Amino acid sequence: MIPTFSLEEVLKSSKLDKNLLAIADKVINKERLTEEEGVLLFEKGELGFVGALANHIAQRLHHNKVYFNRNFHIEPTNVCVFTCNFCSYSRQYKHRDEGWELGIEQMLDIVRKYDGQPVTEVHIVGGVHPKMNLEFFCELLSKIREHRPDMHIKGFTAVELDYMFRKAKLTAEEGLTKLKEAGLQSMPGGGAEIFHPDIRNEICADKVDAEGWLHIHETAHKLGMHTNATMLYGHIEKYEHRVDHMSRLRTLQDKTGGFNCFIPLKFRNKDNDMSNVPESSIVEDMRMYAIARIFIDNIRNLKAYWPMLGRQSAQLTLSFGVNDLDGTIDDSTKIYSMAGSEEQTPAMTTEDICDLITAVGKIPVERDTLYNEIKVYDAVEEA
Ligand code: V47
Ligand code: SF4
């Protein structure tokens, strides 16, 4: 079993910096950290210290429960009008013969493959294709809804939506209302990358900026839709950029309460224009998850997305504040396999996921997209 760090033991250490001790006091008293304190945690907080604090918070919120979801992905295309330097997945329109472009019937065939299976969510995400417009996606959504009315449809990053709405000459509110009427129920968290313009302009200059991304999510929340939020870390950003990013999300969450979960995404460096940038170490990954859990005090769920992190590292994050493994049973996503993830054909059965969770002394809980509990798997029960 992986050891979890006891807060009491860690606080007994006489070597602790007094500012770190003050942060620990704040965490124990449920007080919010400032941005300066967030940066200090990244600079000085050792793995055991941040792990103990993160674990304390996760226990307070979720006891020993770790959530997973039964879902599958549809990736309509990897053709993209944008040119993010970290992306190993996209192909420009002029090279579209090297990529894929699915029609509505082909995507419905993917949905039909899961007929009779207890999946609760479909996650639709892909490149930004210049010819796949709002009308096309409304048709797709309504046909999925008609075929499988019980299944939650989570779809489209704010990057895809921003482009779709600008082309249709609609505001975010008008565009989201149309998609919602067609069947869209929530939005994934992609496209956030790093909000700070100093970094954003270096890694993904041509797509929607921080204000645009946040505006689309705020509008979705206003329309009653929940959304997720991501952060692409471990490349050229500095600690203050990570804290700035998390702080902007924390501020919007105070306003709307619409974020379901936060997902730090580890930068993978295979076959992209940033392949010269080394990947973060596993210690840095665990510190990232722990500090996210400590700093963002108003988003209840912290997700480790195992197809990108690899299942062993994802399992380790459960001792660093993570309470959600996403848990895709058949994840056909190519975003990470093409960028060098250990998971080349990501698929885990419910039993695999439950084993991963129980092996670190936690309780697997199947959830729906909105974190309603579907089934708690206790130790004696077969998955
Ligand atoms: O925005 C692209 C990331 C994201 C690389 O909301 C990369 O439940 C690492 O956001 N290395 C899209 N990351 C995927 C995404 C997501 C995935 C799973 C669940 C949810 C959710 C959202 O993938 C992009 C970008 O940040 N990405 N290339 C790369 N080389
Ligand atoms: Fe396009 Fe998304 Fe890749 Fe950027 S990360 S190039 S928006 S597919």
Image (tube, helix red, strand yellow):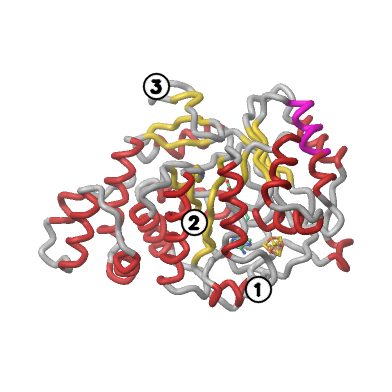
As for residue 141 lying within the magenta part, the answer is yes
In the image, residue 35 lies at what x, y percent?
35, 65
What residue does disc 1 label? Answer: 205
Left or right: 263 in relation to 156 = left
Q: Tell me where the magenta segment starts and ends, as one range.
A: 139-148
Residue type, numbered disc 2: Pro
Residue 332 shows up from this direction: no
Q: Residue at x 54, y 47 (%)?
A: 228
What residue does disc 2 label? Answer: 264
Residue type, numbered disc 1: Ala
Secondary structure mostly seen in magenta is helix
Whole-Å distance between the Cαs marked 1 and 3? Answer: 52 Å
Q: Quadrant of residue 166?
A: bottom right
Whole-Å distance between the Cαs marked 1 and 2? Answer: 20 Å
Secondary structure beneath label 1: loop
Closer to the camera, 318 or 343? Answer: 318
Which disc, if any, is residue 35?
Answer: none
